[in-house]
Amino acid sequence: MGTICQDRTVEVEVSAAEVAAHHPAGVEAVLGGDDRGKAVAAMGEAFANFIAEREDVAAVIGIGGGGGTSIVTTGMRRLAYGVPKLMVSTLASGDTTPYVDISDIIMMPSVTDMAGLNGLSRTILHNAAQAIAGMAMRPAPRAEGKPALGLTMFGVTTPCVTSITQRLRDDYDCMVFHATGTGGRTMEKLADSAMLAGLLDITTTEVCDLLFGGVLPATEDRFGAVARTRLPYVGAPGACDMVNFWAPETVPERYRNRNLYRHNPNVTLMRTNAEECRAIGEWIGTRLDACEGPLRFLIPEKGVSALDIEGGAFFDPEADAELFAGIESALKPAANRRIERLPFNINDPEFAEAAVAAFLEMVRK
């Protein structure tokens, strides 16, 4: 079927064509061309669709170089957390971010190339086979007891989130995610995987980086899991007063004259202005307005971070007012959701108490 589909040298139970048929555009979109790069990307998409619809997957092991690693890990990333995933790869000793992303894939260096077997590769593959077999034969016992909650936190919202977890930890397993782009995505993947009972999304700062070129951005699907799962959700505009960059010299030229704060030698924060805050608020509100589950969004009128307090480096009531107005203009109250303004800074104990009360009110109805 074209030059991409090579004759197989071993018998297989599932053919390449059968997997390729799971591509939205069909088999020919995967195997009918002569561009290897496009074929690898297409087969990765097809394999992800193929494996995601199966109900008989106890574990997945993959072996490959660049192309094989890309294809197999694309499928692995579609599987739920906890399903054993082991990728033996020639690329495992380098930057594995494109392959692992926010999943729980284990990358195992093949050490030698995959072109034939040798004494070392036989040992590596033996160990990999033993590892995946052990994980499949002795799966982790399902956690019993407290339901899990997802919470988002930044350094500048730590007092708030810490207080919330202290108030809820007797009844819930509180999983706190650092709001660095990957943190929000991981939390929402857990929600999509039915591993969370609710969300206290206090720190929605990743939206700022998405909209204004920061280095810790959300994706366009931020809040998508909230809409899909209809889980009880408490949100707040935590740390929406800042965009993140690395060291000062990495700040884009267009932002060099802005209010910048050196968080540490490697992280520089830029205060969001009124116009940006309005856009951030509208973006958040628009996405949450599509959510039909129980939802509360709390607005801390006296500041959204530890820097956004009277006398603080990012204190800017006018910018905050635009942020709050943007949220309220886009997020319309309904029977099961509401916005509540609170006369506190986000890190005041009273704000954390209100967030807990809002969550418990929803789950106890």
Image (spheres, rainbow, N blue to C red):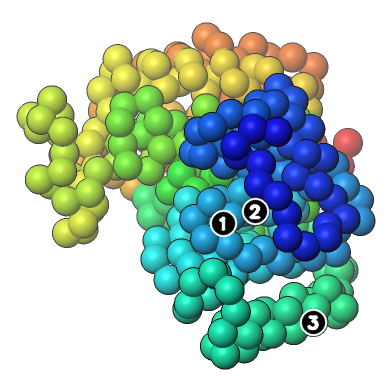
Three-letter amino acid code at disc 2?
A: Val
Residue at horizontal 46%, vertical 44%?
Answer: 181
Drawn side of residue 63 relative to residue 242, left or right: right
Query: Circle 1 sits in a helix, a strand or a loop, which is it?
Result: helix
Give the residue at mark 1: 69
Q: Which of these two is toward me, 352 or 144?
A: 144
Three-letter amino acid code at disc 3?
A: Gly
Query: Circle 2 sits in a helix, a strand or a loop, which is it?
Result: helix
CB of mark 2 within 8 Å of CB of mark 3?
no
Q: Which of marks 2 and 3 is in front?
A: 2
Across and down, in percent, residue 360 comes to 77, 44
The 10 Å Cα crowd at callout 1, few under 14, some 14 to 19, many 20 or more, is many
Placement of the N terminus among the 4 image quadrants: top right
- Find residue 72 and name its label: 2
Looking at this rendering, what residue extends furthest in the right direction? 56
Query: Circle 3 sits in a helix, a strand or a loop, which is it?
Result: helix
Q: Is residue 45 visible?
A: no
Residue at horizontal 65%, vertical 80%?
Answer: 125
- Find residue 134 and name its label: 3
Drawn side of residue 1 relative to residue 249, left or right: right
Drawn side of residue 353 relative to residue 15, left or right: left
Relative to 247, is 312 above or below?
Answer: above
- Find residue 14 and name its label: none
Across and down, in percent, residue 105 comes to 62, 63
Q: Which of these two is toward me, 273 or 301?
A: 273
